Image (cartoon, helix red, strand yellow):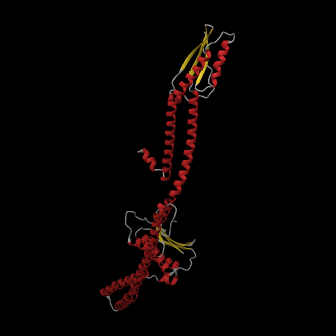
Amino acid sequence: MAYSAAMSRLSLRLRLSLVLAAVLALLLAFDAALTLLGAGRRIDPEIANATELTSGVLREAVKGLTPAPDLERRLADLAQSFDRLRHVRVAFEPEGAALVRAASQRPQPPAWFVALLRPGAVSQRIEAAAGGRRLGDFVVEGDPDDEIGELWDGLVTLALDGAAAAALGFVVIYLAVGGALRPLERLKAGLVALGRRDYDARLPEGGVSEFEPLLARFNALGDSLAAAERENRSLRARLVSIQDEERKEIARELHDEIGPYLFAARAQAGAARRVTDGAGGAAVDAVIESLDALQATNRRLLDQLRPAALEELGLVAALEALGRLLQRSRPELRVSVESDALPALPPELEAALYRIAQEALTNAARHAAATQARVTLKAGEGALTLTIADDGRGLDPTRPAGRGLIGMRERAAAYGGALTLQAGGPGLVVRAEFAL
């Protein structure tokens, strides 16, 4: 399980490279095992043959020896002359003296490697005599050191060459797999772009044939999403336009129909008050008070439905007037408006900015119990940003989005903008961004 968890954290590119490198390492180990197995079967027969051949030569050499003053030295020299032979060591042991073996000059392989091969011990003794007198023995011993040393050197070379080949293969495979999987990296970047609603993102096709249909499908999906986004934006703009037209129509009805009736009723009530005394006068005063309240409500509704200040004074002045209006109804709320020098904006965009600010300030006053709200308009780097920050209770994440928030999002999206909400410590920051 730990191995699976560790592998799952590795990229596909690294996993494939490691698997192929592991296959190369296994092949190297298999080759080394076959080499050892073959060498182990070959060493003993070679040593036995070399020992037997050398013993035969010495037996012929000691036949018919005749006494001589330096015979023992000559026999020792004869034994030493066999040092150049492979797989065998020869020493002359004079009668009554201890055998002296020459130390091997070759570097010895590790003991575990020698034990792994387990070469058999082979030795023979050939008696040397002259004139019926025993001179000593030739000791012929099988010597696998040369074969084992060469085998060890070969395995070390094989391991080094194999490790270098595996490392080089890993690098080549890593680069090759990376190149083959590069379309997936592009696909990942494209999906991230789609997640950011960048529907114009496209992937270059070509490369690995297996990925071509996938890249083509992604580009087709991008085309479909871009077309759907354009259609939705057009529908949202049409919806907002229809809503604004309905607001204007309702405002006209309130202004042209309800307004005159309220004015006439107020005038008649004033005339009636002038000729009425006592209890009747008090009743007329109550009617006049109610009519005044209806007229104030009617004016407030007219300003909300069709802000005349936006058409007459411009966006910044209309926002300042909106702030003053809210402060009159909510004395505890202080609204400030800050703005950069703005370029000429389409009337529809100005209306969208005004409505977004109006909804955000209304929420801050009615639902968030804010005491301060700051409206900021900034234009720069090809973008226009409207920010409304308050110090109220903020947004409750457990409550679903209300109609006001949905309306702000729709207005922003209808004109190609984006609306974001951000907790500002105490309070909430509403930010709408539009491209200029």
Where residue 149 appears, x then y in whole percent?
58, 30
Residue 94 or residue 436, whichever sits in front = 94
Image: 177 above or below 266: above
Q: Residue 278 or 31: which is nearer the viewer?
A: 31
Q: Nearer the viewer, residue 292 or 9?
A: 9
Which residue is depicted at the point 57% across and 78% down? 343
> Which residue is at 51% across, 79% downward?
315
Left or right, 99 with reference to 227: right
Q: Quadrant of the C terminus?
A: bottom right
Residue shown at the point (37%, 87%) measured from the top left: 258
The vertical placement of 427 against 154, above or below, is below
- The percent position of residue 15, horizontal first and vertical second, equals 48, 50
Q: Nearer the viewer, residue 246 or 233?
A: 233
Q: Position of residue 225 (x, y in %)?
A: 44, 70
The image quadrant of residue 60 is top right
Seen from this angle, which residue lies furthest left?
Answer: 279
Q: Quadrant of the N terminus?
A: top left
Residue 162 vertical placement versus 415 (above, below)? above
Across and down, in percent, residue 58 comes to: 60, 18
- Count how many numbered circles sit on residues in the image: 0
Asked if residue 408 can be seen in this view, the reply is: no
Residue 4 in view here? yes
315 up-or-down from 109: above or below: below
Quick one: which residue is furthest to the top in this view? 132
Q: For the view shown, which residue lies furthest in the front direction?
A: 64
Q: Is residue 167 left or right of residue 246?
A: right
